[in-house]
Amino acid sequence: MRVHKLFRKTRFSFFALFGVIVLSVSFLSIRTVSRELDEEYVSNSRSIAKNIADSSVDMLLNRNLATLQSLIDQFVEIESIRYIYITSDAGEFLAHTFVPGIPDEILASDPSSTETVDRSLPGMGEFIEVGSPILSGVAGHVHVGMDRELLGLKIQRAVGQQMYLFGIILVIGTLLSFWFVSFSSKPLADLMSFAVHLAGDGKATGEEDVLGRDDEVGELARLFTHVADGSTRGDEGR
């Protein structure tokens, strides 16, 4: 009989505990990182939209649309920005970065709305669009579309690094738990070996090591010896 069988459930419990902890922390981390990056993404987009709105006031008042187009072309070079368009207070498209033309989903939307919306543009991808009014909407509105795919990649990179760390912790924790269980079961294995030999011929290997222990294993070994001695004396008396 192997003492290790007694600790199979303990080993599985350690493994399950580490697994639950790692999965729980990973899930919470993914949600937190995703939410934080998403909020940061939207916040940066709004700042860019407001910056464009503030910079385009004079151009709109002077109807300098060429300079306005040049302005948004510069901003669209930012990695996360995929499109920008500016509309007048009447909903007219004054400048945009769409090539070759404005998608139907954009044309059908409300140009005066500055709410954050998710857009799916065929042939282009998934986007987060934010808006900012120009002179409180009197001079028009600026709309900025940010690439959701890029946001997803950033989240994957951030989460992937954490998952790599959590995986290492899980493996190390599991190995340590197996070592701990094996270390804890060794005294019981010695006790079993002692009891088997004691029951067989009255002599046990490693007797001094087991009997010299000051824990429960040593107490059981001394009890086994006492019972064995009593049994031997009883047999001799007959």
Image (cartoon, grey):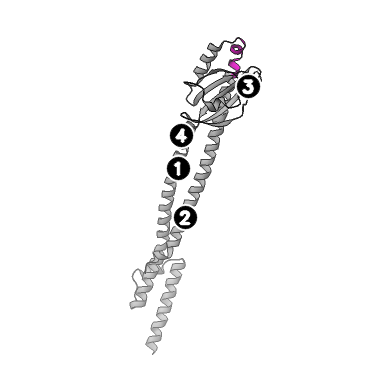
Can you say which quadrant of the picture contains the C terminus? bottom left
Image quarter for residue 185?
A: bottom left
Instruction: Count residues near mark 4 (Cα–Cα under 10 Å), then give few for <14, some for 14-19, many for 20+.
Output: few
Query: In this figure, which residue is indicated by the disc labeled 2?
Result: 16
Q: Amino acid at mark 2?
A: Ala
Choose between 134 and 205: the one closer to the eye. 134
Q: Identify the residue position indicated by label 1 in the image.
A: 163
The part of the image, by quadrant, that contains residue 193 is bottom left
Q: Element at badge 1?
A: helix
Q: Give the image location of residue 232, x and y in percent.
A: 38, 83
Q: Position of residue 166 (x, y in %)?
A: 45, 45
- N-terminal of the two: label 4 or label 3? 3
Secondary structure found at label 3: strand
* C-alpha distance separating marks 4 and 1: 15 Å
For mark 4, what is the residue?
153
Q: Are marks 2 and 1 in contact (CB under 8 Å)?
A: no
Q: Residue at x 52, y 15 (%)?
A: 69
Label 2 sits on a secondary structure element that is helix
Residue type, mark 1 in image: Met
Disc nearer the start of the sequence (1/3): 3
Nearer to us of marks 1 and 3 is 3
SS class, disc 4? helix
Residue occupying the point 52% across, 42% down: 29
**Which residue matches tag 3?**
133
- Tag 2 and tag 3, C-beta contact below 8 Å: no
Q: Residue at x 43, y 68 (%)?
A: 218
Residue 71 to residue 114: above or below: above
Q: Is residue 100 magenta?
A: no
Nearer the N terminus, badge 2 or badge 4?
2
Q: Nearer the viewer, residue 98 or 61?
A: 98
Quarter of the view holding residue 184: bottom left
Count of picture labels: 4
